[in-house]
Image (tube, helix red, strand yellow):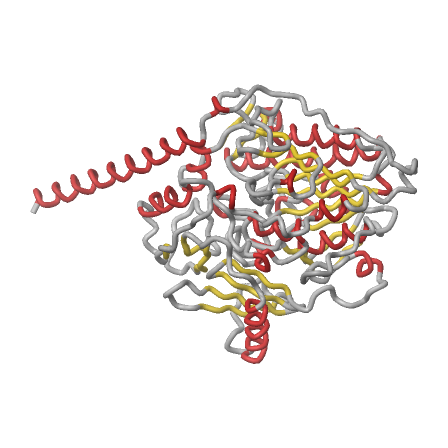
Amino acid sequence: MRWILRIGIALALVVSAAWIFRVDMVLFGVSRTIGDQSTVGLSQTVNWSTGADPEGRGPSERPPNIVLILADDLGWNDISMNGPNPTTQTPNIDALAADGVTFSQGYAANGTCAPSRAALMSGRYGTRFGFEYTPTPPGMMSALRLMDDGDERALRPASVFNPEENELSYDEMGMPPSEITLAELLSERGYHTVHIGKWHLGRANGMAPHDQGFDESLLMSSGLYGRRDDEEVVQARQDFDPIDRFLWAALRFAASFNGGPDFEPTKYLTDYYTDEAVRVIEANKERPFFLYLAHWAPHTPLQATREDYDALSDIELHRERVYAAMIRSLDRGVGRVMQALKENGLDQNTLVMFSSDNGGAGYIGLPDVNAPYRGWKITLFEGGIRVPFLARWPAQLPAGVTYEAPVHHFDMYATAAAAGSAQLPSDRVMDGVDLTPHITGIDTSTPHDYLFFSSGAAQAVRDARWKLMVSAPQGGQRKEWLFDLNADGERKNLLAENPDVAARLRDALAKHKAEQAQSRWPWGSTTAINIDRDLAKPDQPEDEFAYWSN
């Protein structure tokens, strides 16, 4: 019997070594094909356009400037105004809220990034034009599948993989040019339009930001915050996270301007974007402008400046300290943008909006990132879709006000359009509404009767009180939850006790889905996500899972 045991152990070691070798070879191939820093040119200076208002109007007489600041994967509990938080302090974001309006029930359009960005830029559910899933770069889904095959999370329900071939390249997966972006709408009203940072809405066939209404676009071409060998950049790698391992292999430190060649940013990425945003404000202080500042922070890979890292020596867990340092840079950037507006005499007549594309990620291994809400990014639980949602416009909006009714990312589009005196497109269904009359009390109705969320197997609908959640993997068992959002934070499934409410929400969801377009590209996998336990911890028998398609 002893020799049988030895053979079994030897075989297990061989299998394990073979799996590790396969994963390492895949990641090495990825790094050679799309992660080669040598293809990135030297740093260059962006010469931002300047201009004057054609009618010679001063700041108070011109249409308001519009600044939309979007964070990436920022958790609800990452903002210090949302409760006692021992690790992340955000005084500048808190000040933005104190001077403006806080939407306590602000929602991202989706539990992952790109569909939320599509709603922000189009004013519509992305599913109306086939934008349901987040585009992934070459090799990512196959690499994640291979790494998932070696995962020892035996308690997790099996993933489902789609045999349908995706005929679109990464750059072809995006928001079609037929959509009218906020930049295009405001350009027609005489605004100079600028994009800085992440886009993730396609780069081919007229889908790049400089083809979608932005006069100038400083694009995040890849996603490192600094060079891997920079001693002034502190890193934290999560070996327990397949996504993190792929990103470290695939990403470069790179930007491009208006579709030009890639070049290296001049400094740590978040600070670089902030520097350029300040330069844009100074260059356009004499004319109306729309600035879309789409930060990458605090999305993985976790990299922070050493200065910010050293300032948080009280945080013991290394990855948490790096993460908090990244948010420190993000918050400082918000403060610098607000200071630039003030110094140039623009802050009173500028609409500034701030949000995140979705909630904090469970795969970073920080359990309280979305507290007190349940779930994370890659789920439709509140932790995945309820996000910081702020607006400041002293000329029109009251200060220090909290608005309670549910609002959505596409409302930012409609609100900005109305501020710029732009008419919403009349040739299509527009889902967003101007929030200004609701905030000021001119309109006492709620902005929306229902809000809908969709990513393949994951579906949700909410009204003023109730939320129906659906997990329906292809060929698998459908599961539903009904939560009273005024009660216990999505902890108690009230489906059996409230069949009439569930039926009404189910019917509303079915009607909505019937109005949506087929996705422009297929989902690759449908994966079970642990709702309550972050990825750094092993699954337990009592854990609850929800499927997610992408």
Q: Nearer the viewer, residue 63 or 3?
A: 63
Vertical order, 277 against 434 (above or below): above
- Judged from this view, the residue extending furthest toward the bottom is 500
Q: Residue at 70% across / 58% down in the picture?
A: 432
Q: Tell me where residue 501 sits by quadrant.
A: bottom right
Vertical order, 463 against 105 (above or below): below
Q: Tell me where residue 349 sits by quadrant.
A: top right
Location of residue 405 in the rendering, given as x and y in whole percent from the top left corner: 72, 62
Location of residue 448 in the rendering, given as x and y in whole percent from the top left corner: 70, 65
Q: How many labels does the image show?
A: 0
Q: Is 515 on the left-hand or right-hand side of 14?
A: right
Location of residue 353 in the rendering, given as x and y in whole percent from the top left corner: 73, 46
Q: Residue at 46% across / 56% down in the picture?
A: 548
Q: Nearer the viewer, residue 10 or 461?
A: 461
Location of residue 502 in the rendering, given as x and y in whole percent from the top left corner: 55, 75
Q: Residue at 54% across / 58% down in the picture?
A: 380
Q: Residue at 57% across / 52% down in the picture?
A: 115
Q: Is 514 on the left-hand or right-hand side of 119?
A: left
Vertical order, 508 against 281 (above or below): below
Q: Nearer the viewer, residue 514 or 223?
A: 514
Q: Tell me where residue 267 sits by quadrant.
A: top right
Q: Is 337 on the left-hand or right-hand side of 31?
A: right
